[in-house]
Image (cartoon, helix red, strand yellow):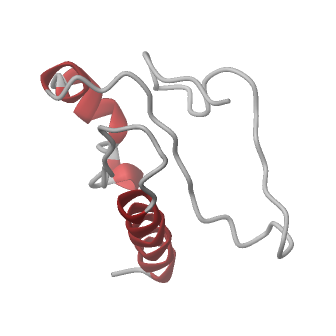
Amino acid sequence: MPAATTATTTMLLGAAKYLAEDAQLPRPRGAIFQPAEEDGGGGDVMVREGMLDRFGIGEVYAIHNTPQVPLGHFLTTRGRSWPPSTRCASI
């Protein structure tokens, strides 16, 4: 597994642990691991195959490892975060 994939998986597992343990956050909630994002799969395929509708997912928040960003900073954008996304928008 490439280092970036390992880091992103670790970040999502940490976020999932926090979400599971914080009783004040509204439920239901979950964590989605997208497969093969760099190879033309990932979230785009998951949306096309109906995952959001099948599990009643109304909101998705994403994170990605970007080593070029200085420690303690993050990047964001308005609108969709990746051109192929059809139903997801970044905040």
Q: Residue at x 42, y 38 (%)?
A: 26
Q: Is residue 5 toward the left or the right of residue 67 in the image?
A: left
- Residue 84 percent location from the top left of the image: 46, 26
Give the quarter of the figure containing the N terminus.
Answer: bottom left
Q: Is residue 44 above or below residue 24?
A: above
- Residue 13 percent location from the top left of the image: 39, 70
- 27 vs 45, nearest the viewer: 27
Q: Which corner quadrant of the image does residue 53 belong to? A: top left
Q: Is residue 64 above or below residue 51?
A: below
Q: Residue at x 39, y 62 (%)?
A: 16
- 75 vs 40, nearest the viewer: 75
- Residue 27 percent location from the top left of the image: 34, 38
Q: Which corner quadrant of the image does residue 69 belong to? A: bottom right
Q: Is residue 55 above or below residue 62?
A: above
Q: Residue at x 68, y 30 (%)?
A: 91
Q: Which corner quadrant of the image does residue 6 belong to? A: bottom left
Q: Is residue 43 toward the left or the right of residue 78 in the image?
A: left
